[in-house]
Amino acid sequence: MTDLPLHFEATTIIDGSAESVFAVADEPDLLTRHMSEPSLMMGGGSMQCKLDGLAGKAVGSVIRLTGKGFGFAIALDEIIEERAPPLRKVWATIGTPQLVVIRDYRMGFEIAEVVMGCQLRVWIDYALPRSGVRHGLGRLLAPTFARWCVENMLHEVQSQHEGSAH
């Protein structure tokens, strides 16, 4: 995907090794947790994550997300494009995703060791729906939705890491 004109990223510092932070961030169920319960950002809907036999932990692994948002059915497949423990992981939508406020996306995380532990950077590159109601919703809500997703992923990894033995 090269036509992804929009971008959001955020970082946090986590007290731990790159290996321990990667082990937590490498869990697709954890990274999608913020969408698993009905919420305002999901338009009152939610999504479920289904993993293939590779569990989202190998290049080529496919993750399926389904649910509802803003009254629309949501369904998409993601494929793991890069996985370089303990430093980087990238995944992207494949096929024709049925989403509401964004269209295709590519996202990932990078981990860098710093004095205070590790810096975790999560990012998303995305495009808006091309037309119709979804395009209008995307123009209004996509930047806020992208920020919400990225910041929730950072929070989930940080909270889970702090709650586990490392």
Image (cartoon, helix red, strand yellow):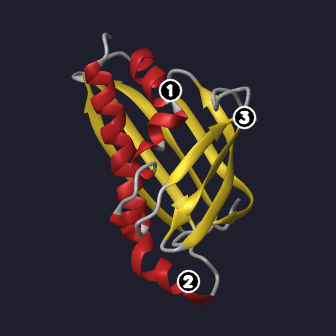
Crowd class of label 3 (few under 14; some 14 to 19; many from 20; radius 10 Å):
some
Query: If you read the primary sequence from the N terminus, does the residue marked by circle 2 or circle 1 appear first?
Result: 1
- Say which element carries label 1: loop
For the residues labelled 2 and 1, the Cα–Cα distance comes to: 35 Å
When asked about the image quadrant of residue 28, the answer is: top right
The percent coordinates of residue 127 (x first, y second) are 58, 70
In the image, 55 versus 111, the foreground residue is 55
Image mark for residue 61:
3
Three-letter residue code for mark 1: Leu
Q: Mark 3, mark 1: which one is toward the viewer?
A: 3
Inspect this view and state whether residue 58 appears: yes
Three-letter residue code for mark 3: Ser
The residue positioned farthest toward the top in the image shown: 165
For the residues labelled 3 and 2, the Cα–Cα distance comes to: 29 Å
- Say which element carries label 3: loop
Could you tell me which residue is drawn at 41 percent across and 19 percent down? 18
Image mark for residue 87:
1
Q: Quadrant location of the C terminus?
A: top left
When asked about the image quadrant of residue 95, the answer is: bottom right
Query: If you read the primary sequence from the N terminus, does the residue marked by circle 3 or circle 1 appear first?
Result: 3
The percent coordinates of residue 53 (x first, y second) are 73, 27
Residue carrying label 2:
135
The percent coordinates of residue 76 (x first, y second) are 67, 56
- Judged left or right of residue 161, residue 134 is right
Could you tell me which residue is drawn at 45 percent across and 71 percent down? 142
Q: Are marks 3 and 1 in contact (CB under 8 Å)?
A: no
Image mark for residue 23:
none
